Image (tube, helix red, strand yellow):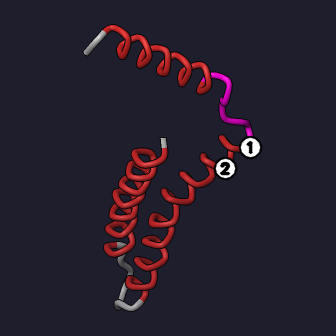
Amino acid sequence: MNDEKWRSDVARDVERLETAKQAKRSLLAQTAYLGTLSILFLTPVIGGAYLGRWLDGMNEGYTTRWTINLIVLGLGLGAFNVYQFVKRHW
């Protein structure tokens, strides 16, 4: 790599860093991002709770086996959703 190309690459990178500093995310953008993360995390958890409660209600007697298992599954799925979203959009 010659010296001239190296200098132009460094100048381009410095320009990009300065542009990124100036274009900080606004409060509204940060709020929307946080809201999206919470929806991605809570939807599988709440869905698992409702589905588990419905399945437990179909059995005789009192049981929470499906509810607890599907809430735990929803927690795992929600964490995976948040991880994938942050990895893609951060």
Instruction: Report helix, strand or loop for mark 1.
Output: helix
Residue 42: x %, y % from top left: 52, 60
Q: Amino acid at mark 1?
A: Leu
User: Where 28 falls versus 50 (above or below)?
Assistant: above
Q: Between 29 and 68, which is closer to the camera in this rendering?
A: 29
User: Where 58 falls versus 5 (above or below)?
Assistant: below
- Going by the image, does 72 lie left or right of 45? left
Q: Amino acid at mark 2?
A: Ala
Residue drawn at (36%, 86%) of the image: 61
Residue drawn at (51%, 67%) of the image: 46
Label 2 Cα neighbours within 10 Å, binned few <14 / some 14-19 / many ≥20 = few
Which residue is the extreme one toward the top?
3
The circle on residue 32 is 2
User: Where 1 falls versus 20 (above or below)?
Assistant: above
Residue drawn at (65%, 41%) of the image: 30
Tell me, yes or no, whether the highlighted magenta stretch contains residue 80: no
Residue 64: x %, y % from top left: 37, 73
Q: Between 48 and 39, which is closer to the camera in this rendering?
A: 39
Q: Verify CB contact (< 8 Å) between mark 2 and mark 1.
A: yes
Residue 49: x %, y % from top left: 46, 71
Find the magenta span and give its range.
21-28
Please give the residue where the numbered disc 1 appears in the rendered image: 28
Label 1 Cα neighbours within 10 Å, binned few <14 / some 14-19 / many ≥20 = few
Instruction: Report helix, strand or loop for mark 2.
Output: helix
Residue drawn at (38%, 85%) of the image: 55
